[in-house]
Structure formats: structure tokens, C-alpha cells
Amino acid sequence: MFRNPVVLRAVAMSALAWTCASFVACLIALVVAGPQGLGSAAVAAGTGLVFPILTVLAIAVPDRGYGSTTYAARVFFGFLVGFVAKIVLYIVALVILLDVVCVVAGAAYGALLATALVSLAIDVFIANGIRGPADERLARESS
């Protein structure tokens, strides 16, 4: 399916991190704001699913060029575009969620923020592991 093992790691890490962040945010919202807070946090966490999807797309789209000299640059560019898109989508989702009357604002904000921050942390972790062919060749020559 994918030639690059980093893509599979990105999918697994994104799914696991989103699940954990959503679960913790929903539990905190349940304790702090009750059942209505739980519902608000669950809706916001579901909305926050777009963040890990963007992470996976940012690394899966340039996967066709895996092994080429421009692969690392393409993935880095994808992460930069994804970062800007996540900021814009975060603001739009927050404005839309807070306009709904029955949503507990603090619970929705916390869950959306948690999923966004976890996704950005996964981006940084994965971007640090991206290596181009020149990087791999230099690493072999230096050892």
C-alpha cells in the first residue's frame, strides 16, 4: 500500500493519539460539566478528527516520491501547508461550535484544543523522523 514505513507509523500514532486525547478530554468534561459537557466534548473531539487526517494526508500524498531526492522537501512542504490549514480549521471549528446554543463552551474548547495540540505534536515527531536519500547516504558514510 505505502512504500514508506513512516506513513504507517503516522497513521497508527495519529489514531492512537487522537483517541487518547479525545477520551481524556471527554472524561474531564464529564467530571467538570456533567453529561452536557461530555456531549459537547465528544462533538468537538469528533470535529477534531480532521487534524490527524490532515497529518496522514500530509505524509501519504508525497509517498509516491519516496526515495527521490525531493521527498523530504515535499513532505516538509506538506507539513507546513497542513499546519496552516490546521490553524484555520481550528478557528473555524471553534467559532461554529461556540455558536451552537446547547454546547458547553469550555468543554468544546478543551476537547478541540487537545486534539489539535496532540496532532501538532505528532507532526513534529514524524517530521523529525523524515529522512531523504542524501541524509541516509551521509549517515552510512559517517558510521
Image (tube, rainbow, N blue to C red):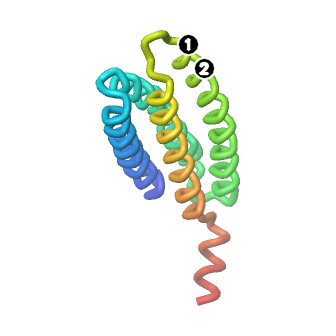
The residue depicted at 44 percent of the width and 17 percent of the height is 103
The residue depicted at 49 percent of the width and 29 percent of the height is 106
Residue 60 located left or right of residue 41: right
The residue depicted at 32 percent of the width and 38 percent of the height is 27
**Residue 90 appears in which quarter of the rendering?**
top right
Q: Are marks 1 and 2 in contact (CB under 8 Å)?
A: yes
Three-letter amino acid code at disc 2?
A: Val
* Residue tagged 1: 99
Q: Position of residue 31 (x, y in %)?
A: 32, 36
Three-letter amino acid code at disc 1?
A: Asp
- The tag on residue 95 is 2
Residue 108 located left or right of residue 94: left
Q: Is residue 29 above or below residue 60?
A: above
The residue depicted at 54 percent of the width and 48 percent of the height is 63
Crowd class of label 2 (few under 14; some 14 to 19; many from 20; radius 10 Å)? few
Q: CA distance from mark 1 to mark 2?
A: 6 Å
Q: Is residue 59 above or below residue 9?
A: above
Viewer-nearest residue: 106 or 46: 106
Say what secondary structure mark 1 lies in: helix
